[in-house]
């Protein structure tokens, strides 16, 4: 995969090829640079839009960010240890999901079956909250796909995580022109680099203390970046008071089916929603 070590104005168009680290450095150095209307910068402004750069620094380690690309991050394969190790599981064409009866502490609580992975990309969750578009190359054409249609569940295809077929790839990511208040947070097991056990990205447009439009996306709970329909319905018109934030949190991920060892993710997700909405209430 082609990677660009340094950002030039022209190369910014190919945002996904950027090393995440170079991009962060570029955005920090010139967040309002004249080139920020360009697709590449806009695409990667999600880094700032969805959270402070500090958060993004939690995507893997500095060494990994130095070689990782946005396209690779969005299309990385699942981290399920049975999948990564020598197990001929369903996702590899076998007929058993070893996680279902085995160690499923890190697996999904919603959208699973016959495979129970969680999608590992933090960026994908941020992009779903932002309602971004994934630009793909398909049969000689460039197509914009809403990110909500890019990832798929195992029930649709248990050997692939997204709609891309052989010969197709991501060429760019496009963010909406206007991004309202946003935040992203994740729980991981260790302070050092680690994947999200549960993560939440939120984008809200408010009128005083009332949410006019809001979107909350979850990572670590489903085989794809997840929107909880019930919660997102509640968000419109929600007053950002302590009690309504409690209600929204309590109504988060009601329709889930945890496995033997991962019930704890429901509580984490609800607490993260509460934290995020509380933080956003005071965020300018
Ligand atoms: C120890 C460790 C910790 C990590 N922690 C995190 C974390 O906390 N959060 C997080 O989000 N990520 C994390 N990552 C993932 C990391 O940030 C990289 O994004 C990931 O390893 C992919 O690497 P890459 O960019 O080099 O892609 P590659 O390894 O080059 O590609 C990954 C996959 O994507 C496909 N691909 C690459 N580019 C495209 C494209 N343009 N179109 C279509 N398919 C494409 C490749 O074919 C391949 O299947 C971690 C990785 C490791 C090893
Ligand atoms: S969760 Fe999916 S990837 Fe993991 S063992 Fe089960 S089928 Fe394989």
Image (cartoon, grey):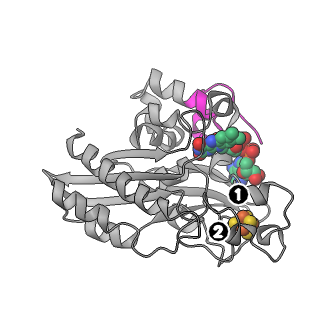
Q: Gap in Å between the C-alphas at discs 1 and 2?
A: 9 Å
* Ligand 2 within 8 angstroms of badge 2 C-beta: yes
Q: Is residue 160 visible?
A: no
First to last magenta residue range: 1-23
Which of 56/244 is in front?
244
Badge 1 local density, few (<14 within 10 Å), some, or many (20+)?
A: some
State whether residue 67 is above or below residue 280.
Answer: above
Asked if the residues shown at circle 1 and circle 2 are in contact, with their CB atoms under 8 angstroms apart, the answer is yes
Q: Residue furthest top?
A: 29
Q: Quadrant of the N terminus?
A: top right
Find out whether residue 21 is within the magenta segment.
yes
Q: Residue at horizontal 79%, vertical 64%?
A: 166
Question: x, y percentage for residue 280?
Answer: 27, 45
- Quadrant in the rendering for residue 103: bottom right
For mark 2, what is the residue?
A: 116
Q: Residue at horizontal 41%, vertical 45%?
A: 184
Q: Secondary structure at mark 1?
A: loop
Which of 194/142 is in front?
194
For mark 1, what is the residue?
A: 80
Which of 7/67 is in front?
67
Find out whether residue 208 is within the magenta segment.
no
Question: x, y percentage for residue 220?
Answer: 54, 57
- Quadrant in the rendering for residue 108: bottom right
Which of 269/232 is in front?
269
């Amino acid at each position: 995969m082609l990677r660009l070590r340094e950002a030039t104005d022209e190369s910014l168009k190919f945002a996904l090829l950027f090393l995440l680290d170079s991009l962060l450095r570029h955005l920090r150095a010139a967040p309002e640079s004249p080139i920020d209307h360009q697709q590449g910068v806009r695409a990667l402004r999600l880094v700032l839009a969805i959270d402070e750069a500090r958060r993004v620094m939690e995507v893997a380690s500095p060494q990994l960010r130095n070689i990782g690309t946005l396209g690779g991050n969005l299309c990385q394969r699942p981290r399920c240890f049975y999948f990564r190790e020598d197990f001929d599981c369903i996702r590899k064409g076998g007929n058993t999901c070893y996680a279902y009866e085995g160690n499923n502490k890190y697996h999904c609580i919603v959208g699973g079956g016959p495979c129970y992975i969680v999608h590992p990309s933090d960026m994908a969750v941020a992009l779903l909250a932002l309602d971004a578009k994934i630009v793909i190359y398909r049969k000689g054409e460039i197509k914009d796909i809403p990110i909500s249609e890019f990832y798929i569940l195992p029930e649709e295809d248990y050997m692939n995580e997204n709609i891309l077929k052989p010969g197709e790839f991501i060429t760019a990511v496009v963010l909406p022109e206007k991004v309202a208040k946003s935040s992203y947070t994740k729980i991981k097991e260790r302070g050092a680099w680690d994947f999200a056990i549960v993560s939440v990205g939120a984008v809200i447009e408010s009128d005083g203390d009332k949410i006019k439009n809001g979107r909350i996306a979850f990572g670590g709970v489903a085989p794809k970046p997840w929107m909880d329909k019930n919660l997102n319905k509640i968000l419109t018109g929600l007053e950002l008071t302590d009690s309504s934030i409690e209600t929204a949190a309590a109504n988060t991920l009601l329709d889930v089916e945890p496995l033997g060892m991962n019930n704890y993710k429901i509580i984490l997700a609800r607490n993260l929603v509460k934290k995020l909405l509380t933080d956003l209430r005071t965020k300018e």
